[in-house]
Image (cartoon, rainbow, N blue to C red):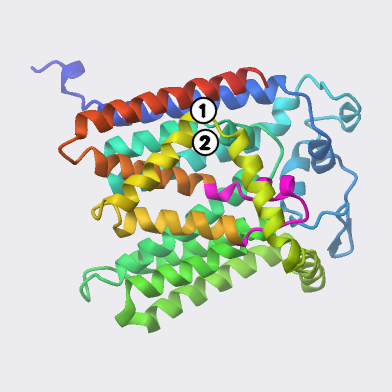
Amino acid sequence: MPDESTSRPSLPLHVLAGFFLLACFAAQCLYVASHAPLLDDERIYASPGPQFVGRDFEKPGDLWHSPLIYHIAQFPVRHGTVPWYDFLGPRYANRWLLRLPFVIFGILFGISLWYVARRQFGHVAGLFALALYAFSPQMTGQGSHIRADVLAAWGVFGVVYLAIASAHTLYAAPGTLTWHDRSRRPILMGIALGIALAAQFSTWIAFPLAIGFLLYLVPGRRRESVAMLAAAAAIGSVFLFAIYRFSSTAAFHDLAEYFGAAPPIASYFELHHAALREAVHSTNYGLFAMTVAGLIFWLASRRARWFGNTSALIALVTILLFTCAGSPEQIVRLWSPATAFLFMFLAGIVADALDTRHRKLALAVSLTLLLIHIAFGLARTLMA
């Protein structure tokens, strides 16, 4: 009889490597969640002060988020896991319990990034994108604090790539896909849109991106594309209104306040220039060098300007241009959904560079810059 221990199928090496990177990300998030003091905005989100009044939700001057972040952050408090009076101390011993849901959201976002990058660019590029994500101080910070950034970024990422996946189903020959297969992605796109909007109002830009990509990919089947987009918009709207307990007055009031707070055009470019300067200043040298090298390769190589790379770059630039707030610091915070598209773009560039005759040089440069990125990320995390 064959030995049972040798007959069991083993996990592929790239899957084990992916799980290892996710474990590294989770360990960093839990370390920060356990050691970093509660910030002022975290205590505002998690404090049981904001309450429902009738069907409306009173938020303390929050122009950027729906009540979703308050629901999630206050769940341990409202259900007795964490006593409310512990918020008086900034170094509450069990603060990691309050941040645990956001650690889980960060892990799920990392899995989504890994899955999409692997499907589009291959196993090596998928692991490269996941390594960038797992050791990114920004993503670690989002996944270890009570903030809506990670949910907003995950939702935008899902909307864009589910729209692209929905377009691909329209290329299938009639009868080859069941109704369930065709409808699953638009439904998930609607849920992702609802999560993104409920997490952060500035993520409205995800839906125009989905419209553009879907209509571009299937120009001959725009009726079906519009039907998919309409279904996603309806599902996303229901999800958003559900957060407000279906109070349209409260929902439209918050949305009107958000769009009414947009700065005038005269200060738009000044704010974005200051925000970009701040973002570049806080970016580690490895990621910055990778971005510059990736853009040069994309411009110089025709093979790199295919839809997979270019769509990620378009999403990245669109979010940077159309996300605005009243201060450069707030703009940098609201730019969080752009980070995953940068990782996707760089992963695609690396995959294309490794497929050239200069693959050894490309591999050496990519690994060197990745190691710098990892070292910088670990140093920033341990100092948190």
Query: Mark 2 against mark 1, which lies toward the viewer?
Result: 1
Residue 302 falls in image quadrant: bottom left
Q: Is residue 245 visible?
A: no
Above-or-below relation of 278 to 65: above
Q: Label 2 to label 1, Cα distance in Å?
A: 7 Å
How many residues crowd around disc 1 within 10 Å: few (fewer than 14), some, or many (20 or more)?
many
Horizontal relation, residue 21 to residue 126: left or right: right
Reply yes or no: does residue 120 show up in magenta: no
Kindly indicate the quadrant of the structure image that contains residue 261.
bottom right
Numbered range of the magenta stretch: 322-338
**Which residue is at 49% across, 62% downward?**
189
Tag 2–tag 1 contact (CB < 8 Å):
yes
> What kind of residue is marked 1?
Phe
| Element on which disc 1 rests | helix
Residue that carries the numbered disc 1 in the rendered image: 25
Residue flagged by tag 2: what amino acid is it? Answer: Ile
For label 2, count other residues whose C-alpha is less than 10 Å away and answer few (under 14), some (14-19) or many (20+): many
Q: Of the two numbered discs 2 and 1 on the same chain, state the one appearing first in sequence.
A: 1
**Rendering coords of residue 87 (x, y %):** 87, 30
User: What residue did someone put label 2 on?
Assistant: 107
Residue occupying the point 48% across, 58% down: 315
- Left or right: 358 with respect to 194? left
Please provide percent x and percent y for residue 151: 61, 48
x and y percentages locating residue 125 in the rendered image: 32, 39
